[in-house]
C-alpha cells in the first residue's frame, strides 16, 4: 500500500512534469506507467491538496483588473481600457480607435452583420481597421446620414470605408438621419430600400457606436444637426448624451423630445436587442454620458480610457480595488512559473 508520503511525492512529480516540463498527460502516463485518466485525476488532486497553487498577480502594463471591475459593476460582456500616452484629445481618440478596432476584429468571423453609427470616434476606429476579405459580412448603417456628406465622420462615408476594409457587403441608409417633420420621417421609413436597411440593422450581430454629448461645441452643434434651441431643450430635459441621435438621461433612459419623431434610424429599444453593442468613448467631457450608457444597458461592451474607467468606478462611491491587470502563475512547492510557461496537454 502506498504511503501518504509516497502519494504526495507522486503528485509533486506529476505536477512538475505537467506545469514545468511541459509534458502532456499522455507523455506523463507513459513515464509513470499510468493511464491518461489517472494522470488527469492526480493533477486535479494536486490542485485540490494545494501541491499546485494558482496565484493571480498584477501586471504593471495591463488594465485587466480595472476591466474586470467595470464588467462586474455594469454587467458587461467586456470592457477594454487603454492608458493613452497623454490625455490630449487627439491621442485619446487614436488609442481608443486602435483598441476598438482590435476588439472588433477579435469578435468577427467574417459572416456577421455589423451595424454602425457615426462620429469622430468611429472614424478613428475605421482608420485602424486592417484589410480583410470577408465577402459574406454585411455592414449596415443604423442612422441615416447627418451633417456634411463630404465630412469623414458622416455615417455613409464610415460605412463605405468599413465595408471596403473588410471586403464586405454594404447596406447604406439612403436618407438623411434627421428630417423636418414626423410626416417626412414616416414617408421615408416606408420606402422599401430604407425599410430594408432598418430591418437589417435590427438583425445585426454587432453594433459599433459612438457616444455623443449635447453641448455647445459638440459634433451635433458644429455640424448644425441640432439648433441651439434644441440643445437647450435637451439640456432642460436632463439629456446627458446620445447614441445615433437617440438622447438619454443619466440613467440611460430615452429622453422624450420631438426630435425622436424626426429621426430615420433605429431607436434605443431596437439597438438594445443587438447581441453585442460596442460603445467607444473617452475623455472627461464624456464621463457622465458613458456612465448613463452603462447604467441603462445601452451597450454591453465599453472601450474607454483609464481615467474615465476610474471615474465610472468611483462616481458611485466605490473605488477600484487595483490599478493593474492580471496574469496567472502556478506555484509548485516553492517554485513560481510565469504565464507563458503554463502548458496544458
Image (cartoon, rainbow, N blue to C red):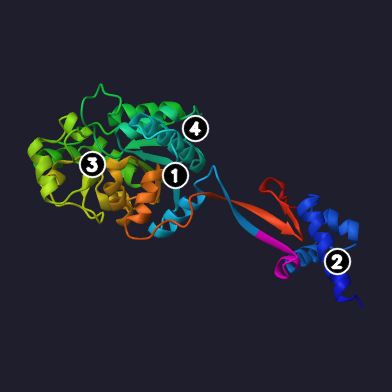
Q: How dense is the environment of label 3, judged by Cα within 10 Å: few (below 14), some, or many (20 and up)?
A: many
Q: Position of residue 114 (x, y in %)?
A: 39, 40
The quarter of the picture where the N terminus appears is: bottom right
Say which residue label 3 marks: 213
Residue at left 54%, top 42%?
61
Tell me which numbered mark, 1 or 3, is placed earlier along the sequence: 1
Tell me which numbered mark, 1 or 4, is placed earlier along the sequence: 1
Say which residue label 4 marks: 134
Mark whose residue sits in front, 3 or 2: 2
**Inter-mark Cα distance, 3 to 2:** 63 Å
Say what secondary structure mark 3 lies in.
loop
Mark whose residue sits in front, 3 or 4: 3
Q: Position of residue 14 (x, y in %)?
A: 82, 60
Tell me which numbered mark, 3 or 4, is placed earlier along the sequence: 4
Q: Does residue 77 show up?
A: yes
Tell me which numbered mark, 3 or 2, is placed earlier along the sequence: 2
**Inter-mark Cα distance, 1 to 4:** 28 Å
Labels 3 & 2 near each other (Cβ < 8 A): no
Say which residue label 2 marks: 9
Say what secondary structure mark 4 lies in.
loop
Say which residue label 1 marks: 81
Residue at left 21%, top 25%?
148
Kindly indicate the quadrant of the structure image that contains residue 264. top left
Front-most of residues 305 and 324: 324
Tell me which numbered mark, 2 or 1, is placed earlier along the sequence: 2
**Inter-mark Cα distance, 3 to 4:** 34 Å
Can you name the residue that lies furthest to the left here?
229
Segment colored magenta:
46-54
From this view, report whether residue 147 is shown above or below residue 53: above
Residue 34 located left or right of residue 316: right
Amino acid at each position: 500500500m502506498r504511503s501518504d508520503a509516497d502519494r504526495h511525492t507522486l503528485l509533486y512529480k506529476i505536477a512538475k512534469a505537467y506545469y514545468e516540463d511541459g509534458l502532456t498527460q499522455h507523455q506523463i502516463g507513459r513515464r509513470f506507467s499510468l493511464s491518461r485518466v489517472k494522470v488527469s485525476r492526480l493533477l486535479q488532486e494536486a490542485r485540490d491538496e494545494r501541491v499546485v497553487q494558482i496565484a493571480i498577480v498584477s501586471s504593471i502594463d495591463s488594465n485587466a483588473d480595472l476591466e474586470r471591475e467595470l464588467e462586474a459593476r455594469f454587467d458587461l460582456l467586456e470592457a477594454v481600457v487603454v492608458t493613452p500616452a497623454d490625455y490630449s484629445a487627439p491621442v485619446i481618440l487614436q488609442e481608443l480607435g486602435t483598441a476598438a478596432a482590435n476588439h472588433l476584429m477579435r469578435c468577427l468571423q467574417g459572416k456577421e452583420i455589423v451595424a454602425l453609427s457615426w462620429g469622430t470616434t468611429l472614424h478613428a476606429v475605421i482608420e485602424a481597421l486592417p484589410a480583410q476579405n470577408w465577402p459574406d459580412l454585411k455592414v449596415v448603417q443604423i442612422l441615416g446620414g447627418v451633417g456634411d456628406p463630404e465630412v469623414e465622420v458622416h455615417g455613409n462615408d464610415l460605412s463605405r470605408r468599413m465595408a471596403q476594409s473588410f471586403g464586405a457587403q454594404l447596406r447604406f441608409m439612403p436618407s438623411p438621419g434627421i428630417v423636418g417633420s414626423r410626416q417626412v420621417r414616416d414617408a421615408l421609413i416606408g420606402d422599401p430600400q430604407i425599410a430594408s436597411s432598418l430591418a437589417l440593422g435590427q438583425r445585426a450581430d454587432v453594433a459599433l457606436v459612438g457616444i455623443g454629448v449635447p453641448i455647445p461645441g459638440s459634433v451635433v452643434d458644429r455640424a448644425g444637426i441640432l439648433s441651439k434651441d434644441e440643445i437647450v431643450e435637451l439640456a432642460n430635459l436632463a439629456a446627458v448624451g446620445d447614441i445615433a441621435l437617440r438622447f438619454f438621461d443619466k440613467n440611460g433612459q430615452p429622453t422624450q423630445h420631438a426630435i425622436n419623431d424626426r429621426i430615420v434610424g433605429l431607436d434605443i429599444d431596437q439597438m438594445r436587442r443587438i447581441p453585442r453593442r460596442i460603445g467607444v468613448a473617452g475623455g472627461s467631457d464624456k464621463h457622465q454620458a458613458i456612465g448613463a450608457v452603462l447604467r441603462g444597458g445601452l451597450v454591453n461592451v465599453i472601450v474607454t480610457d483609464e481615467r474615465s474607467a476610474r471615474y465610472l468606478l468611483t462616481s458611485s462611491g466605490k473605488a477600484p480595488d487595483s490599478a493593474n491587470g492580471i496574469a496567472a502563475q502556478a506555484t509548485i512547492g516553492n517554485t513560481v512559473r510565469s504565464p507563458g510557461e503554463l502548458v496544458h496537454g
